[in-house]
Amino acid sequence: MNTSYDVKFWETRRNSASKTPSYTVRWTVGGLAKSKTFRTKALADSFLSDLRQAAKRGEAFDLKTGLPESMLAPARNEGPTFLTFSQSYLAGRWVHLSALSREAVAYALLSMLPMLVKDIPNRPEDDDLRAVLRTYALLPESRRSELPKQLEKALGWLEKASLPLADLAEPRVIRLALDSIALTFAGKSAAATTVRRKRAILHHMMESAVELRLLPSNPLHAVKWKRPVAADAVDPGTVVNPAQARALLDAVGRVGRTRGRRMVAMFACMYYAALRSEEVAALRRQNCHLPEEGWGVITLERARPQANKRWSDSGESHDERGLKHRAVKETRTIPIPPVLVALLRAHIDEYGAAADGRLFRTGQGSRYSASACSQVWQEARRLAFTPEQLVSRLAARPYDLRHAAVSLWLNAGVPAPEVAKRAGHSVDVLLKVYAKCIDGHQSRANGQIDHALDE
């Protein structure tokens, strides 16, 4: 490595020509000009301070990168591979993440790890590489079962072929990582929301590597890569009106001999109380105040999101957690209309509750899986909808009932803060995501506009 002790620094400069304000640190090493641009002045000043402190300590500066020895990434044969860093990253974050978040990190790594490898012979099939990562290599050691023999070769190859983490400092390699998360496992373009989530995970991993001094800076800041645009707002084409919602709930009760009837009140909670699916799964008899007449109240305490058993704390498909966007023991109170009170009372009269008070469970007492709920829902759509509606996006998923509920409340004139409180959102998110007209209300809106224009 060629180094020099001849270092000079200049003041941080604001780049006024850029549309987005940025700040550039400038210095020279052995007479060679160096610069690095940051999004904020605080970051630029911090970086410049690190350089100056290194110079005061008498460190040599690398002529190629312009960085002092203490800020250079470790030699590639000394630092971790991307595989070993990924394993330590997920293991270190494990206790702080929900099962769904662990699964999201793992699936982002399933996209990247098979791509960030050296070109060495006898590469296994991608399916085998992902299988050994998903079922063994990315799990903490204490949760690993015995590695199947057919996957031993895949793991051995991956351990040898995985690129050094330091290679990700090269634009070519970090761009390869970005390109890998933009595709599905089948090689097609991934959904924009999926790409955005995986890029956020990669960004956090690179920030952690910088914090641990495994990389000199976050390499994502050095490449220009256009992210796909993700739609945050609810698609109005998915939102049912009250008549359509009632028809769907009636159809749910006609699916199978008893299977659908046991789920009517469950889906009704999503429409009449805007509950999330994980909130419905955790709803207990003691959470419900159900008077014989008038409005009732649901007081939510916990949620039971579904994830693969290998990522949960309990080893089951559902882990009990606090409510989304709330402190661990914080509750949410939702007034419920008489129609939902009646449905819940009828459900309890017919099916009772589990020993712990849970309302919704199969005939054998187990929890409903997401796939079971989806199967019943799709059959209900076939029973309730016209052929044109059936092939449309209208209420394509049970979760669209929640969107319909919040949209209905807003269109009914309920103040946004009250809607946000009931739905478990901030007002900002509510207005950005849920303020949509429901199906069939466009004509009423058009009439109001016509009336205003005629005045």
Image: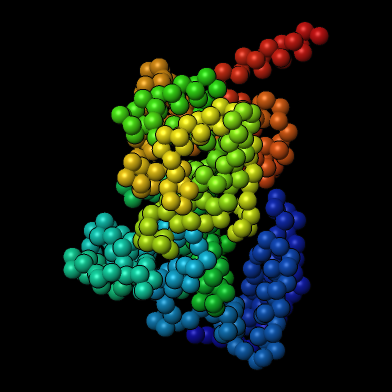
Image point (66%, 64%), residue name: 38
Relative to 99, is 441 on the left or the right?
right
Relative to 266, is 163 on the left or the right?
left
Report x, y in % for residue 400: 50, 34
Image point (60%, 40%), residue name: 289
Query: Does residue 408 lie above or below 184 as drawn?
Result: above
Report x, y in % for residue 216: 56, 74
Quadrant for residue 207, please give it: bottom right
Q: Residue furthest top?
A: 454
Image point (64%, 31%), residue name: 295
Q: Residue furthest right?
A: 455
Q: Is residue 43 visible?
A: yes
Q: Residue furthest bottom?
A: 58
Query: Does residue 335 lie above or below 367 as drawn?
Result: above
Q: Is residue 118 visible?
A: no
Query: Does residue 120 lie above or below 316 as drawn?
Result: below
Quadrant for residue 422, please give it: top right
